[in-house]
Image: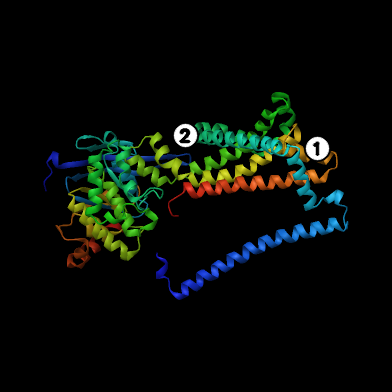
Amino acid sequence: MNEKPDSRILAFDGVSLTYHTKEGETLAVKDLSFTVREGEFMAVIGPSGCGKTTVLSLAAGLLAPSSGTIAVRGKSASESAGKFGYMLQKDELFPWRTIQKNIVLPLEISRKNTAENREKALGLAKKYGLGDFLSYYPDQLSGGMRQRAALIRTLAPDPEILLLDEPFSALDYQTRLSVCNDVYGIIRGEKKTALLVTHDISEAISLADRILVLSKRPATAVAMHEIGFEDLTPLKRRENPLFSVWFEKLWKELNI
Amino acid sequence: MKKQNFSGEHLAYLKKEKKNSIIVWAARAGVLAVILGVWELIAAFEIVDPFIISSPSRIAKMIGQLWENGTLFYHIGTTLWETLVGFAIAVILGSLIALALWWSERARKILEPYIVVLNSLPKIALGPVIIIWFGTGSTAIVFMTVLVGIIVAVMNMLGGFMATDKNKITLLRSMGASKAQILRKLVIPSALPEFIGMLKICVGMAWIGSIMGEYIVSKAGLGYLIVYGGQVFRLDLVMAATFILCVLAAGMYFLVVLAEKIVIKHPR
């Protein structure tokens, strides 16, 4: 357990969030504290509707906490809005842009659309097998390829942390296993820090170094587990005997 | 896919499709020929007085006459000009207003009841007001055309802008996009199909506006010919102008369809 301040890239400290609508107010997140360390893959699981996506929106600076602080490398999260790579359930590729144009979109937004950055992003696309599809439109690609393109787009601006919001849930089961493997490989290959939220326990175990378990709404931390599979790929992890042990344990925690 | 790769079954399928499309086109032409033929015969044998129903040959002759005395293109030009100017203003101004309403939720809420009322109001009720304000020239007719089209343009475009995928907006915001960037990179391009749809509706609206305007007040144009022909009981003139109108309206619609094919390139 290395918890030196400089290795903590993202820190939630006593974070609460209340949503306000005309009908009333809802406490979505309550007194949540955790840290994400540099280079690790962390998963957040919780029962559906517990506010997992809210946690990511908070981390990305899209929402401001009602109380508590969120720090990114010691600075407030709202200052670092746009520095995170956010990947959603669906690929959200723009159908009127080619894959190449989709991948450089974050560069256009952050006005870092230099030849050098473009080269880097497209190099990444080529490295991970999208080289032949750069001039295709998203609708001409399979679901797995589209999700891969979405990941490359997320990586294009060289983000500090990847925030993954159930990125495989829109895919069919077969594709899901292979894309999961794919994404793991790419994120490890690029040595990125990642924070994944999911309701799928096996997905969390097959991807993460650490798993944070959230309670029902209002979401708060129930447990934090060090999975300890080291560098096993998701598919190898699923074959490991410890996999079902973890599954059982987390499943029970979710159902408390 | 290359043509030589097709199997025999597929070639047969293509042949059948081609045959089907030939049948449809032939039937379309046939329907027109039958209508014109029956019409001509009814008039020729005076089953119904051709003075009342006119006939295809009399319409053709009337168009020929208009062409000879040099007023054909004057009338077409007048109406076409009024329609196109009104159409362009309604589309451009309507889209800009829709953009402003997308931008400001408050403006949207404030103006909503006014838009609903203006949409329900029969624009022809404003006829006298328009004559008094804009006189009896082309300006009044263009104004009527704009009035008929603009609310439809605003409502369609606003609907398109508001239907922008929320997740894609979240995605752009997570990249640190400003509202102007979200508008430029996402909202406008994603509303392109709605824009084309709105153009198609506005083509119809513009013709309604210009002809309605010419009915109320005009000295030239196809609407003028129709009203004048009706007043002096020259059905040939009424039918001829109506026929020309059909051709022009269809032509304008197909131009929009052509624009759609050029603008929307990505497969759906």
Residue A130 visible to an observer of this rendering: no
Residue type highlighted by circle 2: Trp
Q: Where, by quadrant of the figure, is residue A186 drawn?
A: bottom left
Percent x, y of residue A60: 30, 41
Q: Is residue A239 left or right of residue A173?
A: left
Residue that numbered label 1 is attached to = B228
Residue at coordinates 44% horizontally, 43% vertically from top-left? B189
- Parent chain of label 2: B
Residue beneath disc 2: B103
Up-down relation of residue B50 to residue B178 (above or below): below
Residue at the limit of the structure toward the front, as seen here: B68
Label 2 packing within 10 angstroms: few (<14), some (14-19), many (20+)? some
Give the Cα distance between marks 1 and 2: 47 Å
Q: In which chain is the residue bearing label 1?
A: B
In percent of width and height, residue A197 lies at 29, 51
Front residue of A151 and A132? A132
